[in-house]
Amino acid sequence: MTIKEIAIRSIQELPENATWEDIQERINFIAGVRKGLRELDEGKGIGHERIREEFKEWLSS
């Protein structure tokens, strides 16, 4: 499925009374998820242990 097809399908799934902002939010969300998945595939992700350590710091402050 092409990017254009994904965008069209995503917009079609929105309710009939969707606003321009709703459409923009949906497209931005999908673009962000796809970018994140691409970065993970490229090995650019943050390891599970590092996340655990950061959460410990955030929660103990």
Image: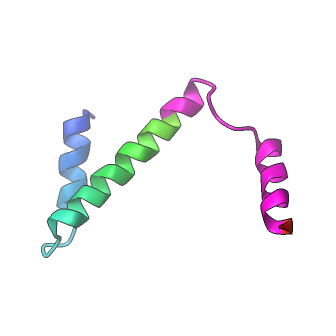
Residue 55, percent across and down? 78, 58
Residue 27, percent across and down? 28, 51
Q: How many marks?
A: 0
For the C terminus, the quadrant is bottom right
- Outermost bottom residue: 17
Query: Is residue 29 among what the camera can see?
Result: yes
Residue 52 forms part of the magenta stretch: yes
Query: Viewer-proximal residue, 59 or 45?
Result: 59
- Residue 43 as seen in the image, left or right of residue 14: right
Q: How is this picture coloured?
A: rainbow
Q: Give the range drawn in magenta.
A: 38-59
Residue at x-position 13% and y-position 73%:
16
- Residue 12 as seen in the image, left or right of residue 34: left
Please, what is the dominant secondary structure of the magenta stretch?
Answer: helix
In the displayed structure, would residue 3 be above or below residue 32?
above
Residue at x-position 24% and y-position 66%:
22
Q: Image quadrant of residue 21?
A: bottom left
- Outermost front residue: 61
Query: Is residue 13 among what the camera can see?
Result: no
Residue at x-position 69% and y-position 38%:
46
Residue 51 forms part of the magenta stretch: yes
Query: Viewer-proximal residue, 21 or 13?
Result: 21
Residue at x-position 27% and y-position 35%:
1
Residue 6, percent across and down? 26, 44
In the displayed structure, would residue 1 be above or below residue 52?
above
